[in-house]
Image (cartoon, helix red, strand yellow):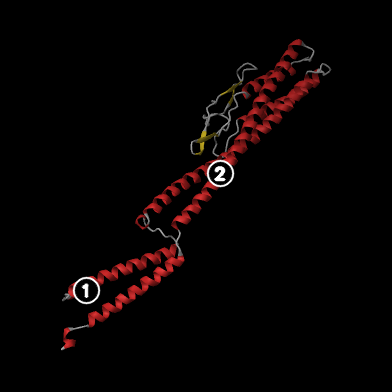
Amino acid sequence: MRVASTQFHATMNTALQNANTRLEGILQQMSNGLRVQKPSDDPIASVRIARLTREEAALDQYLENIGALRSRLGQNEELLDGMSRDVMQARDLMVWAADGANTTQDLQAMSTSLIALRDSLMYSANSIDQEGRYLFSGTATATAPIALNGAAAVGTRYSFAGNTDPQRVVVGNGVTQDANVHLQEMADVLNRLDLAIDALQTPGATANDPAVRTVLVATLNGLDTGLDAVSAKIARLGGAQTTLETLETNHANVSLSNKQAMITLGQLDYGDAAVKLNGYTTAVQATQKAYAKVSALSLFDTI
């Protein structure tokens, strides 16, 4: 059978192109260590790798959210712990002030300490983060949680200006965690301290005066209520941070498992690749030599 020169050249060029394509493919695999370069290389593995990649992206976001949330909850806990100590000191002063043996001068000296504690509590309640957002205003982060109206009557000057809505952060698949703490109860604590300060600063004030004692007892009860509320918030923050730590560990373990699965599915077997490379290289060289030999033949050589 006679083979036309053009047909021969076309067939040989196609064979060389195919061989070179296979050779380039194996060289590319060996250069980056990935067996699957495109979906058609292994459709099933490609689908599984794509699914694992999406899950990895979600886990990375969860871990990032958890890191930021743990930092914020830790900051909130430290501030609340400081406020708890201030309330405890104020409570100790109220117990001391209720002692009927104190003089008017003693009570006035105590009121000076209470003023410092009151102002410290308000300052802490109106704390802001690095971005200038209020920490204890619920979702109204642009509004100071504790507002002061200096023109109002003593005992009503402080009010809660934020809200109690939670700021929820996604920390897992279908799992959210509140990122904020509100301090609605602090306004009542500050108003009661304000009343106690006013009562202790009254000229001739004495703990044996029924009116003064009524204010001191009411303030003591209000401080107890406020202290219980702050303590409960601290406990919830501690529990939340423990939960986040557990979630972070679980996400890290799942991420490690996913990465190992992706390596197993997509990594290249260099031993098998070396064998294929040798075979493809030999095939290309043989095809080129055969092409050169046949192309040099001529019918005139047989005459």
- Quarter location, residue 91: top right
Q: Considering depth in this image, is 52 or 234 the residue closer to the camera? A: 52
Q: Give x and y (percent) for residue 86.
A: 70, 29
Marks 1 and 2, how far apart in space?
62 Å
Q: Which residue does the numbered mark 2 point to in the structure image?
A: 250
Residue drawn at the location 47% of the way across and 44% of the way down: 58
Q: Amino acid at mark 2?
A: Asn
Asked whether 79 or 39 is in front, the reply is: 39
Dot 1 and dot 2 residues touching (CB under 8 Å): no
Residue shown at 19% from the left, 72% from the top: 7
The first of marks 1 and 2 along the sequence is 1
Residue 153 spot, x, y in % from top left: 63, 16
Q: Residue at x 23, y 82 (%)?
A: 296
Q: Amino acid at mark 1?
A: His
Instruction: Please tell me whether mark 1 sits on a helix, a strand or a loop.
Output: helix
Q: Residue furthest bottom?
A: 303
Screen quadrant of the C terminus: bottom left
| Residue for point 62% across, 17% down | 156
Q: Is residue 201 left or right of residue 298?
A: right
**Mark 2 neighbour class, 10 Å CA radius: few under 14, some 14 to 19, many 20 or more:** few
Q: Quadrant of the N terminus?
A: bottom left
Q: Which residue is mark 1?
A: 9
Q: Is residue 123 above or below residue 255?
A: above
**Does residue 28 appear to the left or right of 87 in the view shown?**
left
In the current view of this chain or complex, which residue is farthest to the top?
Answer: 210
List x then y, in percent, for residue 150. Answer: 61, 21
User: Residue 40, relative to residue 16: is it above or below?
Assistant: above
Q: Quadrant of residue 249?
A: top right
Q: Is 147 in front, or is 35? A: 35
At mark 2, the secondary structure is: helix
